[in-house]
Amino acid sequence: MTIDLKLGAPGLVVDGQQRLTALSQVHDKDFQIFVSAVICADEAELRRQFVLINNTRPLPKSLIYELLPTVRGLPRRLGDRSLAAELAAKLNYDQHSSLKGYIYQHTNPTGIIRDTAIQRVIINSVSDGIMREMVKEPNGIELCFDLVSEFYRAVQYVFREEWRDHTPKTSRLVHGAGIMALGYVMEILALLDGARSWQDFARGLACLVGRTAWTSGQWDFGNGDQRHWKSVQNVNRDIVSLAQYLNTIVRNDVKARRAAAAEALDLEVSVLSARAQ
């Protein structure tokens, strides 16, 4: 459609004036700009549309993320979020999920764990972790679903008192910071310990018992960095500090268990050799 400007501007801009001014200063460029046009019967209708358009609230991020899996042809950034949103929804509504009903979404306002926290765990794993290859399998979505569900089932088992009947205000275990920091622990146990079932994950998480401050006490992140349990917030700096603290303990435990297993194997071989002689 071509608009004839010979008789002057056919309408008024009710929103986006700054963007239009910036575009007017771009010369020798040929690209498309999408606009929404409203046909008004008179100036009274125009004024009403101006008020309505400039007082419209943006859609909640939670709703947008839930809708992403139904949209195709998205850019990579939103494509990763779409996969994460799909898995988060499955974790929230599948009857076999350990997180069934726990995740706060636009369609589940009674959930206590932010959907963005679970989605970030998934996005990190798909980008640089265990799910990167797992999701490429024919049943990749199911494998990723099982991994996350089994891990947080183990979290609920090992830290049952810090999980049960708590909210993010009363326990950092169900807080965004705790959920995302534990996501990195899931990676370590899945990659280094081969954990897949909740029993495997529970064995790997056992080393953290008595060394956390999910609901009371203080975190000791080392080098004099001590935090009251409630001071850990859902910001990148705190998430990284908490993740590094938990990861160090879990990595050391994995190494210790490997060393103990190797030592036991050497002893068994020695005993068998002695008997053979």
Image (cartoon, helix red, strand yellow):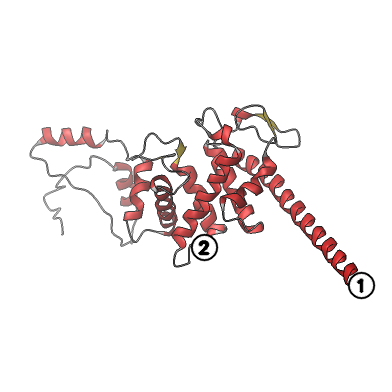
Three-letter code for the amino acid on which mark 1 is drawn:
Gln
Q: Secondary structure at mark 2?
A: helix
Residue 240 in sight here: yes
Please tell me how many numbered marks the rendered image carries.
2
Residue at which label 1 appears: 277
Q: Quadrant of residue 26?
A: bottom left
139 with respect to 211 (left or right): left
- In the image, farthest residue toward the left: 41
Q: Secondary structure at mark 1?
A: loop
In the picture shown, does residue 142 fall above or below 19? Answer: below
Q: Earlier in the sequence, mark 1 or mark 2?
A: 2
In the picture shown, does residue 5 fall above or below 102? Answer: below
Rendered residue at 64%/40% (across/down):
242
Residue 227, x across and y down, in percent: 66, 30
Residue 40, x across and y down, in percent: 11, 41
Residue at which label 2 appears: 134
Q: Nearer the viewer, residue 272 or 144?
A: 272
Residue 172, x across and y down, in percent: 57, 33
165 with respect to 43 (left or right): right
What distance separates the C-alpha of mark 1 from that of mark 2?
Answer: 47 Å
